[in-house]
Image (tube, helix red, strand yellow):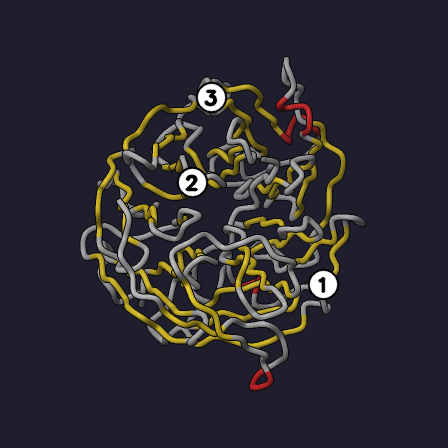
Amino acid sequence: MSETVDRRRFLGLAGGAGAGLVVASWSWSGAPAQAATVAHRYEYVFTTGTASVYDMDHGHRLVTTLALGSDVIRIRGACFSPVTGQLYVSYLGPTSDPGTHGYLLRYDLARRARVWRHTFAAGQVDSMDITPDGLRIYLPTGATQTQTTTWRVLRGWTGAQVAEVAVALQPHDTVVSLDGKEAYLGAIGSEYLWVLDTATNRIVRKVGPLGAGGPPGGGGVHPFTINGRHTRTFVSVLDLLGFVVADLVTGKLLFRVDLTKLGFSWPDGPTGEPSHGVSLSPDETELYVIDKPNNMVHVFAVTGVTATPPIAPRLVASIALQGSLTGTQSTGAPKEGWVQHSLDGRFVYVGDAGDVINTSTRTTALVLNKLADTRISLEIDFDASGHPIATSSRTGIGRVA
């Protein structure tokens, strides 16, 4: 269903620092953002009440800090639409808020202002994603929610709910395909990744089981990513130091990569979340994988996984992090890790540790203190006139169309 929206004017962030930011006005007509040359690349890092904006092309210097609001605490997800210029942040609020409670904030990036905040009194919120046209948001009801199984389907412009999709217990992570035709839904309480048709908002198939070969009770879906043609998925699963690879078309498990069999120890096993995060390079040649027990990120060559027959991922590098994945964030949440590629593939951002990895040298270029206190970050790119033209999701997904 199409949405009727008023034509609006926006101001786009295009460079500078603080009050010296360069801006340009533009209008939105409901059409997808047109291809343009990227002039400015920024990494947005979300911590309590703020989003810190770093210039990726100039040593990741801090450009500005967006004030999201003092109530924006315990952030669970973020997504942006270059088409509409709207940024969305899901969060739980203060610890004094009810356990089944959550919020979704819409923030106008051009005006640097909050537009609305929706409160969800039943079920929490978690890591959502948005369709390429900016019209639909798929918002899970929360990883800690052992009695809820649903994703909310919301209008991007108003936040109004248009559907609710029952999936599995502990709804957690969401990825929408580049063409917007499918959404992938990961619930911690399920050994399957669920595939939703965005045209009908119906589940069309499930992928897995993904815990095959693991310890009893293992295999619940944690962070995951997909390739650009959405034929393969790489999934972090409960109780596995490593990841699994599955075929999104047939729903079959292809490979299970166990890092303990490659010489990496996990003294606290066999239960927990040792590999909380996977990110696929934009050219789909490499996969970066979190290794919390050893405070590392591992790099796998994965070009062969789409071959016929598919070829197993191959470990090509292991990077010791300068930041730490141990301890807790300032909110008290335990550090677990996260990885996100930049859109051009030059950098990998490691949430909870803060490392910014140069992918050409496979070394840490610098550590961002803000990124060491969160797992929520994404990239937004602008053209020379200040128009937003591209964004990553929280997850580094493949971009080979």
Q: Nearer the viewer, residue 335 or 340?
A: 340
Alpha carbon separation for disc pair 2 and 3: 16 Å
**Going from the N terminus, do you reach mark 2 or mark 1 first?**
2
Position of the N terminus, as image quadrant, is: top left
Foreground pick, 148 / 156 = 156
Going from the N terminus, do you reach mark 1 or mark 3 first?
A: 3
Q: Position of residue 288 (x, y in %)?
A: 64, 41
Vertical placement of residue 102 versus 226, above or below: below
Residue at the far right: name it.
361
Mark seen at residue 84: none
For disc 1, the neighbor class at 10 Å (few under 14, some 14 to 19, many from 20) is: some
For this orientation, the residue located farthest to the left is: 121
Residue on which the image places disc 2: 180
**Can you tell which of label 2 and label 3 is closer to the viewer?**
2
Whichever of callouts 2 and 3 sits on the residue coming sooner in the sequence is 2
Disc 3 is placed on an element classified as loop
Q: Residues within 10 Å of mark 3 (few under 14, many from 20)?
A: some
For the C terminus, the quadrant is top right
Please give the residue where the numbered disc 3 appears in the rendered image.
Answer: 249
Q: Amino acid at mark 1?
A: Leu
Identified by mark 3, the residue type is Val
- The residue under the point 62% across, 60% down is 354
Q: CA distance from mark 2 to mark 1?
A: 34 Å
**Dots 2, 3 in contact, CB < 8 A:** no
Q: Categorize mark 2 by other alpha carbons within 10 Å: few (<14), some (14-19), many (20+).
A: some
Residue linked to disc 1: 366
State how far apart marks 1 and 3 are (Cα): 39 Å
